[in-house]
Image (spheres, helix red, strand yellow):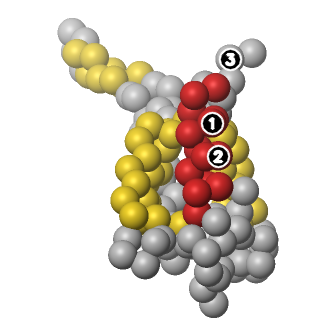
């Protein structure tokens, strides 16, 4: 699903690296660790019943469809695929994620305000 609005300064964090330092007899040693999982969070709206000028043409104007999409995926315990394109259409991120938190509230005009927190998901092969 194409989200109707994403903040213009969408965060693309780099993962933390789990390095460790050990004390030796004559000097310290550093072990380069594995990369952690990226975490993403943002706030926006799901419009209900009307289109805004900033919405992409592929986005739905039924915000409850987005809510149902996220609820259904979370209940089925399947990761979501997050794809982020830049303004020129080049793919800057394409990764599976889990939704850790989804907080919703209905605005006076009927739109749905939401905040979402996601964590990168790695498939075990």
Q: Left of 77 or right of it: where is 17? A: left
How dense is the environment of label 3, judged by Cα within 10 Å: few (below 14), some, or many (20 and up)? few
Task: Name the foreground residue: 111 vs 94.
Answer: 111
Asked which secondary structure carries label 3, the reply is loop
Residue 72: numbered disc: 1
In the image, residue 28 sits, relative to residue 102, either above or below, namely: above
Q: Residue beneath label 2, please?
A: 69
Q: Which residue carries the number 3 mark?
A: 124
Neighbor class of circle 1 (other Cα within 10 Å; few <14, some 14-19, many 20+) is few
- Ranked by sequence position, the earlier of labels 3 and 2 is 2
Mark 3 or mark 2, whichever is nearer to me: 2
Residue 5, label in figure? none
Which residue is rendered at x = 64% and y = 66% of the image? 62
Q: Earlier in the sequence, mark 1 or mark 3?
A: 1
Spatial separation of the CA atoms under disc 2 and disc 1: 5 Å
Q: In the rendered structure, are the residues bearing label 2 and label 1 in contact, judged by CB atoms less than 8 Å apart?
A: yes
Location of residue 91 (image quadrant): bottom right
Whether residue 24 is situated above or below residue 70 in the rendered picture: above
């Amino acid at each position: 699903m194409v989200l109707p609005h994403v903040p213009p300064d969408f965060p693309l964090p780099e993962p933390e690296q789990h390095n460790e330092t050990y004390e030796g007899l004559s000097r310290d040693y550093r072990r380069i660790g594995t990369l952690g999982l990226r975490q993403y969070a943002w706030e926006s709206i799901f419009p209900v019943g009307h289109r805004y000028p900033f919405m992409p043409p592929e986005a739905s104007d039924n915000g409850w469809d987005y809510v149902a999409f996220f609820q259904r995926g979370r209940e089925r315990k399947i990761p979501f695929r997050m794809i982020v394109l830049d303004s020129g259409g080049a793919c800057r991120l394409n990764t599976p994620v889990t939704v850790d938190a989804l907080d919703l509230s209905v605005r006076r005009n009927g739109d749905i305000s939401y905040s979402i927190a996601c964590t990168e998901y790695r498939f075990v092969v």
